[in-house]
Image: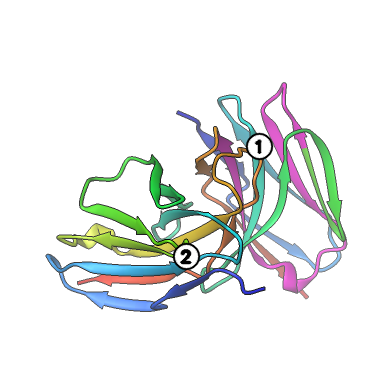
Amino acid sequence: KNEVEQSPQNLTAQEGEFITINCSYSVGISALHWLQQHPGGGIVSLFMLSSGKKKHGRLIATINIQEKHSSLHITASHPRDSAVYICAVKEGAQKLVFGQGTRLTINP
Amino acid sequence: ETGVTQSPTHLIKTRGQQVTLRCSSQSGHNTVSWYQQALGQGPQFIFQYYREEENGRGNFPPRFSGLQFPNYSSELNVNALELDDSALYLCASSLDGRVSKETQYFGPGTRLLVL
């Protein structure tokens, strides 16, 4: 059974700061997802990674398969980035195993 | 192209009752996964349906059951509701449930409160 750990659980920063959220998992996976969840519940898929690095706008996601670790970075953070960021790993074809999420608050 | 939709958005039930939640998958997607998210927790996998057949199940009791229709929309049924079933129920659709590196597109969720 895969254990997915995220850190930190809560993060508060000032607008403009560089943000890093970490995710570690215990068992080999086929893919890792970073998701964003806003108040009210809707989840948006940000990235799906199986190796290396992906960039989309101010968001960068990296994964190290050997170390079973991934990071999500936000550059030039903005209050609209405030949300819960969730790491989820894919076991086989069906199942996503989720971390508990990191609650990010960006103050103006 | 419409996204994933769920209904209802909110629901209040009492212990022992039964509930049916609905999900319409994104156009062209044949796979729907259901998740339960308790307050302050990450989502937990309930089950997945691929082309109307159950294609994987998480650690949930048999009173959680599902259905997928020929148009790939799906229902989640929960019988004999318990207080701990209070949660946000999320469905996610993907293009092909047999493929491991598939993005899942999430619906807005149904918030269920059991009193």
The reply, left or right, for residue A73 in relation to residue A4 is right
| C-beta proximity under 8 Å, tags 1 and 2 | no
Residue A86 versus residue A7: which sits nearer the camera?
A86
Q: Is residue A86 magenta?
A: yes
Q: Residue B71 carries which label?
A: 2
Q: How far apart are marks 1 and 2 (CA)?
A: 28 Å
Closer to the observer: label 1 or label 2?
A: 2
Q: Is mark 1 on a helix, strand or loop?
A: strand
Mark 1 is surrounded, within 10 Å at the Cα level, by few (under 14), some (14 to 19) or many (20 or more) other residues, namely many
Quadrant position of residue B57: top left
* Number of numbered discs: 2
List the residue tagged with mark 1: A31
Quadrant position of residue A44: bottom right
Query: Residue B7: x percent and y percent?
Result: 41, 76
Residue A84 in the image: above or below residue B19: above
Q: Which residue is drawn at 41% across and 65% down?
A: B88
Check the residue under mark 1 and report the chain it is in: A
Mark 2 is surrounded, within 10 Å at the Cα level, by few (under 14), some (14 to 19) or many (20 or more) other residues, namely some
Q: Is mark 2 on a helix, strand or loop?
A: loop
Residue B69 versus residue B91: which sits nearer the camera?
B69
Magenta residues, start to end: A63-91
Query: Does residue A107 appear in the picture of this structure?
Result: no
Q: Which mark is residue B25?
A: none
Position of the C terminus of chain A by quadrant: bottom right
Amino acid residing under circle 2: Asn
Residue A68 versus residue B50: which sits nearer the camera?
B50
Query: Residue A81: x percent and y percent?
Result: 73, 67
Query: Residue A27: x percent and y percent?
Result: 56, 25
Amino acid residing under circle 1: Ala
Residue A46 versus residue A5: which sits nearer the camera?
A46
Q: Residue at x 38, y 78 (%)?
A: B8
Q: Which residue lies furthest to the front in this view?
A: B70
